[in-house]
Amino acid sequence: MTGRGSPSRFLTAVLHNGVGRYVRQLQRLQLLFSPTAADARGARQFVEEAAQDFARQHPDVVLYVSPHSGPGPAPVLRAEYLNGTVRDELIASKTSEEIMQLATKLANQSGLDIIRIRKPFHTDNPSVQGQWHPLTNKPSILTVQGPRLQPQ
Amino acid sequence: MCSGASREEEREVEAGQAVPEKEESSKPSLIHPPPRRRSYVPPEDLQSRLECHVREVFGPSVPEDWQQAPLQENRLKYRLLARLVAELGHAVPNSQLHCMRRAGDVLGFYRTPVKDGTEIGELAATELPPNLKIV
């Protein structure tokens, strides 16, 4: 199966993030869970134990904890990035440590699509002294054209 | 809670004690303990209150250390627990009745406070870092 069947992109950082200062691309994390459902137990433990630590370690991410009462959808961790990408991760039947790892992973990502990257490298300045071409290092008379140069 | 009390009453009927039955049926407030388990904070003078109830219920047969008073007899156990429920508003749940074997066990149970309310609500009331919002 070629790569043409699925979308792909080049390796890039959002607005050259990291070349100068580094700006965390994760804008906010929303923790949607039910206070009574059985599969949201890890989410509840995360809120009680680890959410404050996570918030202190990542002061530039806003963490919203939204318990919705009554039977609702599965517990989900919603990540919103500065480029507008919204990513939902299911946290049903996950432990508090796993949710912490997941949140840290999301915090370290940029919001770019997770698709095939064509090349594992990218540079804006591929050549410093000029890209070689067959007339590099040849006498410049080969390229001159004009009235002074006539076949003798 | 009500079914536990009535089960003890049935046991007393089988024991054939007619006189105490009449005493208990004339006090309806002791037969139905409060149904819901709300928050409970143990009062300051819990030990003295409990001691005085134990002495009233047991009468002359209280041993030296009142905390070792056995609750094997269901009549005495029921009377003691019903009085405590009426006074403190906090009942021993059915699942823990078998643990109450001495007056000391009852004292230990009534010493533990019970919190009512969600953990998340309490968490919202504490001081949170500025980037953590609850709802």
Image (cartoon, rainbow, N blue to C red):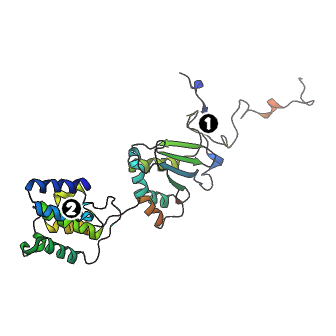
**Chain on which label 1 sits:** A
Q: Amino acid at mark 1?
A: Phe
Report whether A11 appears left or right of B36. right
Q: Nearer the viewer, residue B131 or B8?
A: B8
Q: State the mark number for residue A10.
A: 1
Quarter that holds the N terminus of chain B = bottom left
Above or below, B88 relative to A28 = below
Above or below, B85 relative to A80 = below
Quarter where residue B9 is shown: bottom left
Report whether B15 appears left or right of B45. left
Q: Residue B55's spot in the image, x, y percent?
A: 13, 75
Q: Nearer the viewer, residue A83 or A20?
A: A83
- SS for tag 2? helix
The residue drawn where x is 55% and y is 37% is A114
Q: Is residue A13 visible?
A: yes
The residue drawn where x is 21% and y is 57% is B5
* Mark whose residue sits in front, 2 or 1: 2
Q: Nearer the viewer, residue A76 or B96?
A: B96
- Estimate how packed mark 1 is, as few (under 14), some (14 to 19) or many (20 or more) residues with alpha carbons within 10 Å: few
Q: Is residue B101 visible?
A: no
Above or below, A66 relative to B19 = above
Q: Residue B34's spot in the image, x, y percent?
A: 31, 61
Q: State the mark number for residue B25.
A: 2
**Chain on which label 2 sits:** B
In the rendered image, the residue lying farthest to the right is A147
Q: Amino acid at mark 2?
A: Ser
The residue drawn where x is 60% and y is 32% is A8
